Amino acid sequence: MKYQSRGQQAIKAWEDFVSIPLEVLLQQHINTSAESSVLDLFHDVAANVPAYQAFLADRGINPDAVQSFADFQKLPAIAKENYISRYPLTDLCRNGQLDGCDMIAASSGSTGKPTFWPRFFTDELQIATRFEQIFHDSFAADNKRTLAVICFTLGTWVGGMFTTNCCRYLASKGYPITVITPGNNKDEILRVIQELGGNFQQVVLLGYPPFLKDVIDTGISRGVDWQRYQMKFVMAGEVFSEEWRSLVGERVGSQNPCYDFASLYGTADAGVLGNETPLSICIRRFLAQNPTAAKALFGESRLPTLVQYDPVSRFFEVQNGQLWFSGNNGIPLIRYNILDTGGIIPYNDMLQFLADWGFNQLENLTSQTPDSPRGIHQLPFVYVFGRSNFTVSYFGANIYPENVTVGLEQPVIKDWVTGKFVLQVKEDADKNRFLSVVVELAPGVEGSEDKRQAITTSILNQLLRLNSEFANYVPKEYQTPQVMLTPTGDREYFPIGVKHRYTRQ
């Protein structure tokens, strides 16, 4: 009987997914009270998830007393430490049963010990709507033959299999999408694009930003004519600059970055939490050109990931600069602190802010597309800086890797370097502090004093432009970074096969 009801649940969710057009679904959610929805989710989880029942009982909380959204806001946050790691995996699932899920992904935490995240088919369908927003609104894949090339790592890690499934669900809904899964095998990716890409009107690469850039650059060195394939990109996992987007777009012949790229704010814990839209990209590109406006909006001298989200699917709150979210999943999460720093901006507040700065985003988007622009939904925005422990402090100024990245993405310099660097504050023999940047040269590029000087100047110019703390706190004679150039794969700073860290303390 239990399995029959699970089957009925799957059929109902599937029928809704394939029959309700994206526009209709998003409008339904915009018209739904997100606060009522998250309160309903809380009561469902409190009644059916043993771990959450124990979590509330340990703190003397009676779920029946939580009747209003104000009551909900007094609930303690859950996190990996006090919740996920503390209870058995089965108890974190509904009814204490792991077999209510049909797929398990793994994520490696900072300790290196993997955390397991079960999910069911219906959990994937609600995330598939985020992919539908991208493929429909950004790529117009409802009427273009599209090859989706999955470049995320395959296996137990969440990106590859989850993304593959979501793209296939879109194909089942009627989108002319064909999926292929080379994973992060660069030679295989280039082979499938060259052998199959010509059969499609566009090719979408889905993967981590630095890896996708490496695929494009390797393709260029091997004579791949990227313009022929009308390339599009879906990315996740890292904050990148608008200069990066422009650079990659330029290398593949992209004419319209707002419609050729989309980044996901995703996590193993709960799938995709939000996604870039043509509107959010258009806004972010304006802010990249106007650092003063960006600082006024975000409160920091670095550009975060900026996405829109559906609060009925993933409900965000901000506490002390940290993002908490609630959402249904194989492991349902209530006020979950993912340890990301950021904030939320209601749709109308964002439009008012842009108007105050004299920017008309609709006019800007309309000028970029011959048809009426897709992807304008009155959904709130969430911005994400990610973990705050990757900054270095120099004369009291917080310096972010993102500031240095932009310096390496300027014309000419971008051709000399891979984009990897190590930022740290060091002391000389007299114990004077200085800012050190070790930069990895691109394969086949030899270092020279002229290159080192040009890179130094470019990094300094962008630090002064983008980071007002740096410009105002750091004495002039200490502002110029000391740049060292190393060949590709330097064993001390850029060992091959090891996850790169951009800062050292």
Image: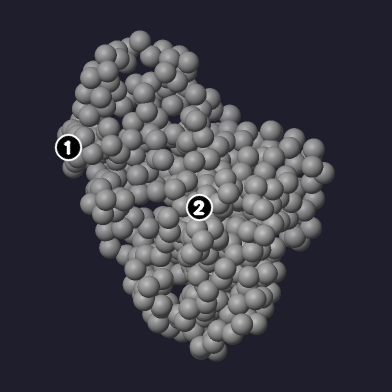
Q: Position of residue 314 (x, y in %)?
A: 46, 37
How many numbered dots are placed on residues in this image? 2
Indicate left or right for 503 with 6 as reference: right
Image quadrant where residue 244 sits:
bottom right
Q: Secondary structure at mark 1?
A: loop
Circle 2 residue = 392
Q: Position of residue 9 (x, y in %)?
A: 31, 38
Residue at the outermost right position: 358
Quadrant where the image shows the C terminus: bottom left
- The residue under the point 58% across, 33% down is 30
Circle 1 residue = 88
Indicate left or right for 172 with 302 as reference: left
- The residue under the point 43% across, 15% down is 71
- Amino acid carrying label 1: it is Pro
CB atoms at circles 1 and 2 under 8 Å apart? no
Q: Secondary structure at mark 2?
A: strand
Q: Earlier in the sequence, mark 1 or mark 2?
A: 1
- The residue under the point 33% across, 12% down is 64
Front of the two marks 1 and 2: 2
Q: Position of residue 200 (x, y in %)?
A: 54, 75
Q: Residues within 10 Å of mark 1 (few under 14, many from 20)?
A: few
- In depth, the one of 52 and 171 nearer the eye is 52
Indicate left or right for 433 with 366 as reference: left
Q: Position of residue 121 (x, y in %)?
A: 32, 47
